[in-house]
Image (spheres, rainbow, N blue to C red):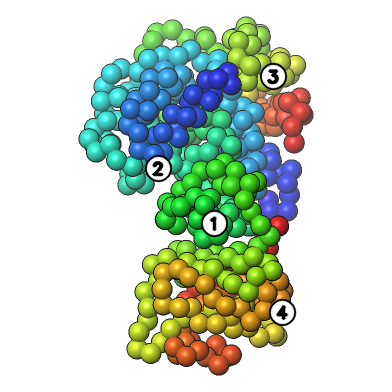
């Protein structure tokens, strides 16, 4: 997300907070494709993703007044709302969602997911916000990076990661924990 | 609780919360802590700032038109100010709202709130009810241009509702106040304002009766520095109209921190 775009989104959110429905429509236009992408990727079901998206935008409208750009970038805030809602949903009808992941497309639903290779990280390089993160992810060991990205994009739990990566649960937990620690120190914040 | 004094553990949990690997009851419990703990929320936000840019790597996909139609239907045709969501709302959705609310009740932001509401009509003339919604950035702007050293207090009733704002320049004998939705008790009773001391053994000091008007001033017996300087909080009790005579007898109506602002 570029600074200019951040500013525009923050302004739109501010206008939403003042009850400006036209600004809300523009915010939706600008952000819903990305957030829908995030939801579909995590839930693997369009109907669920549509439902979640709908709930999230209602919530964004209702909470826009309390939003402050000084405290959180617009896309960070909205992405958190969507990812959180997706994680709530994944927690409930777990089996249903897992089945749908395999049946619907006929293709390997995880084919597009970053493996140990760096390929998809190249996408992040296009965005200035994400570039530092991409660089730091690239420095992680392959398995660690894969575990973190599967958890983020697919909403996989520790045990799902263990199963998918065919590793003991303890190993996967350690990868996640160490990977996050290293990301933090690589990003140079405390 | 073990997590409270273990910042390393807090940070690890915040990271896994944001990543999504903190699940089930642990996730809910953690959200419970975060509601109560502003420092923990900041850790969560820091991790959101670190990890959420990953979402940039997701291919965008335009949702079907029906999603927007459904959102519009949910919000109704009334394009007025958004209300609080009556439906279910996720934890994170409203967290920054709570935080903003929390900010205006404490320390500096409370000072600013009172300053904006009472001190200087030339700064901004708006009803207090609207000032509470002023974005934090705007409050900070006011601070940098207009503030003078002052004492400020925001008093809340039992239900946590702000009912009384107070402000006094440190060298002044005048305490400005504003009552918010406090009706007069009647029956020969009124409200008395107290400064509460730090030490449990010490007695509260009466600052005088609060006039039965929405906003005005109370004459302090000495400059605010002497009258308020060593008292960390203010309180209001219900007393006979002529005053309690120095020892509070009635029920406490409201209470809140009194902060130095300079």
User: Do the residues marked 4 and 1 share a common chain?
Assistant: yes
Residue extending farthest to the bottom is B245
B228 or A137, nearer to the observer: B228
| Rendered residue at 43%/83% (across/down) | B190
Q: Which of marks 1 and 2 is in front?
A: 1
Q: Which of marks 4 and 1 is nearer the N terminus?
A: 1
B73 or A52, nearer to the observer: B73
User: Do the residues marked 1 and 2 share a common chain?
Assistant: yes
Please determine whether, in this image, residue A50 is positioned above or below residue B110.
above
Check contact, mark 4 vs mark 2: CB within 8 A.
Answer: no
Determine which quarter of the picture holds residue A163. top right
Which residue is disc 3 drawn over? A132
Q: Can residue A141 be seen in this view?
A: no
Q: Distance between the residues labelled 1 and 2?
A: 38 Å
Please identify the quadrant where the C terminus of chain A is shown: top right
Which residue is disc 1 drawn over? B120
On residue B89, which mark appears? 2
Please determine whether, in this image, residue B231 is positioned above or below residue A21.
below
Which residue is disc 4 drawn over? B199
Label 4 CA crowd tier, 10 Å (few <14, some 14–19, many 20+): few
| Rendered residue at 65%/41% (across/down) | B43
Q: Earlier in the sequence, mark 1 or mark 2?
A: 2
Q: Which of marks 2 and 3 is in front?
A: 3
Residue A38 pos. (x, y %): 47, 21
Please determine whether, in this image, residue B175 is positioned above or below residue B40.
below
Q: Nearer the viewer, mark 3 or mark 4?
A: 4
Chain of the residue under label 4: B
| Rendered residue at 60%/10% (across/down) | A126
Check contact, mark 4 vs mark 1: CB within 8 A.
Answer: no
């Amino acid at each position: 997300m570029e600074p200019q775009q951040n500013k525009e989104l923050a302004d739109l959110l501010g206008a939403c907070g003042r009850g400006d429905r036209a600004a809300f429509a523009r915010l939706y236009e600008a952000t819903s494709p990305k957030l829908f992408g995030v939801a579909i990727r995590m839930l693997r079901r369009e109907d669920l993703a549509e439902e979640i998206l709908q709930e999230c935008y209602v919530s964004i409208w209702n909470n826009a007044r309390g939003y402050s750009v000084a405290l959180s970038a617009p896309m960070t805030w909205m992405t958190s709302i969507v990812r959180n809602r997706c994680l709530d949903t994944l927690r409930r009808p777990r089996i249903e969602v897992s089945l749908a992941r395999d049946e619907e497309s006929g293709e390997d639903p995880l084919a597009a997911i970053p493996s140990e290779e760096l390929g998809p990280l190249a996408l992040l390089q296009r965005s200035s916000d994400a570039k530092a993160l991409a660089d730091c992810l690239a420095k992680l060991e392959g398995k660690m990076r894969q575990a973190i990205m599967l958890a983020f994009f697919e909403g996989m739990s520790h045990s799902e990661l263990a199963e998918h990566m065919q590793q003991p649960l303890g190993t996967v937990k350690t990868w996640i924990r160490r990977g996050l620690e290293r990301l933090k120190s690589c990003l140079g914040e405390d | 609780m073990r997590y409270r004094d273990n910042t390393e553990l807090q940070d690890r949990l915040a990271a896994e919360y944001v990543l999504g690997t903190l699940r089930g009851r642990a996730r809910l419990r953690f959200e419970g802590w975060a509601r109560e703990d502003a420092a923990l929320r900041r850790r969560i936000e820091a991790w959101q700032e670190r990890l959420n840019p990953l979402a940039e790597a997701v291919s965008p996909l335009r949702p079907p038109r029906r999603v927007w139609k459904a959102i519009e239907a949910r919000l109704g045709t009334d394009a007025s100010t958004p209300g609080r969501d009556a439906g279910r709302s996720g934890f994170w959705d409203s967290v920054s709202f709570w935080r903003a609310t929390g900010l205006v009740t404490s320390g500096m932001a409370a000072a600013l709130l009172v300053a904006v509401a009472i001190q200087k009509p030339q700064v901004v003339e708006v009803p207090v009810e609207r000032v509470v919604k002023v974005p934090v950035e705007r409050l900070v702007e006011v601070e940098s241009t207009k503030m003078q050293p002052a004492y400020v207090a925001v008093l809340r009733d039992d239900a946590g509702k702000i009912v009384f704002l107070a402000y006094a320049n440190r060298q002044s004998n005048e305490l400005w106040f504003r009552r918010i939705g406090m009706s007069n008790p009647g029956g020969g009773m009124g409200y008395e304002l107290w400064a509460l001391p730090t030490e449990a053994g010490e007695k509260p000091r009466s600052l005088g009766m609060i006039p039965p008007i929405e906003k005005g001033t109370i004459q302090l017996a000495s400059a605010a520095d002497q009258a308020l300087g060593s008292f960390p909080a203010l309180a209001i009790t219900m007393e006979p109209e002529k005053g309690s005579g120095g020892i509070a007898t009635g029920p406490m109506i409201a209470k809140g921190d009194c902060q130095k602002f300079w």
